[in-house]
Image (cartoon, helix red, strand yellow):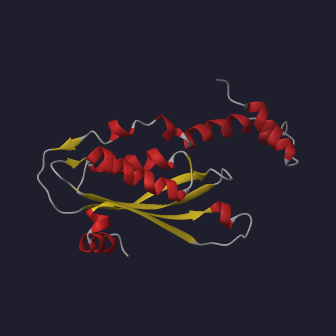
């Protein structure tokens, strides 16, 4: 598929710019390249990411805190950024630590809403790691709220819990404490 360079040129003209101005000549190519880069999560195989595991017996909570992400709001195609904290209680094997960070990118690098992204990350951990429980807390700052409309800053926090982290008050409290809440 050819990049929609003419569409970007039309958008530039729509906002009152001259797409033939020297500084904008390569902008359509750059915009298309950037859009593909910022949405490369659609091409990610989640099962493959989480298939790397190790035969280590560990029955306590594993927490990865403050993994940075950058995503794009599906409503305005503007960025939202923040951090993700993930945790799971292994059953038989542990997952490679970097794989959890890759999981964040797999869902963040799509047109998203924070609520769905939070649930997708937790659901993928549940499905592919098969833990006793898992939890995800996502913090985000949304430029669609800061730079347009109401023009106010505010951090959005969402969470998704499964298994014992949802049903066992002690496990839930431990996760939230380790996540910084």
Is residue 66 visible to us here? no
Which residue is pictured at 69% across the width and 53% down the height?
76
Question: In the picture provided, is 36 more to the left or to the right than 46?
Answer: right
Question: In the picture provided, is 31 more to the left or to the right than 107?
Answer: right
Which residue is pictured at 83% across the width and 38% down the height?
10
Which residue is pictured at 12% across the width and 49% down the height?
56
Rendered view: 38 above or below 167? above
Quadrant in which the C terminus is drawn: bottom left
Residue 110, image quadrant:
top right
| Residue farthest top in this picture | 1
Residue 146, image quadrant:
bottom right
Return the residue nearer the eye: 100 or 130.
Answer: 130
| Residue farthest left in this picture | 57
Which residue is pictured at 52% across the width and 39% down the height?
40
Residue 48 point in image, percent of width and height: 33, 36
Exactly how many numbered labels are in the figure? 0
Quadrant in which the N terminus is drawn: top right
Residue 19, image quadrant:
top right
Is residue 73 visible to us here? yes
Residue 102 point in image, percent of width and height: 38, 46
Residue 135 point in image, percent of width and height: 34, 61
Question: In the picture provided, is 93 more to the left or to the right than 25?
Answer: left
Rendered view: 148 above or below 102? below
Return the residue nearer the eye: 130 or 144.
Answer: 130
Return the residue nearer the eye: 2 or 91.
Answer: 91
Rendered view: 28 above or below 76? above
């Amino acid at each position: 598929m050819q990049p929609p360079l003419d569409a970007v040129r039309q958008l530039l003209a729509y906002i009152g710019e001259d797409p033939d101005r020297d500084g904008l000549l390569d902008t359509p190519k750059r915009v298309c390249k950037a859009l593909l880069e910022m949405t490369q999560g659609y091409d990610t195989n989640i099962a493959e990411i989480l298939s790397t595991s190790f035969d280590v017996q560990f029955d306590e909570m594993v927490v990865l805190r403050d993994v940075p992400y950058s995503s794009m709001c599906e409503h305005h195609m503007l960025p939202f950024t923040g951090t993700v904290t993930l945790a799971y209680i292994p059953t038989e094997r542990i997952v490679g630590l970097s794989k959890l960070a890759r999981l964040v990118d797999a869902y963040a690098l799509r047109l998203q809403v924070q609520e769905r992204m939070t649930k997708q990350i937790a659901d993928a951990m549940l499905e592919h790691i098969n833990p006793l429980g898992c939890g995800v807390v996502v913090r985000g700052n949304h430029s669609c709220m800061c730079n347009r409309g109401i023009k106010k800053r505010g951090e959005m926090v969402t969470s998704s819990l499964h298994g014992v982290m949802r049903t066992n008050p002690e496990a839930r409290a431990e996760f939230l404490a380790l996540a910084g809440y």
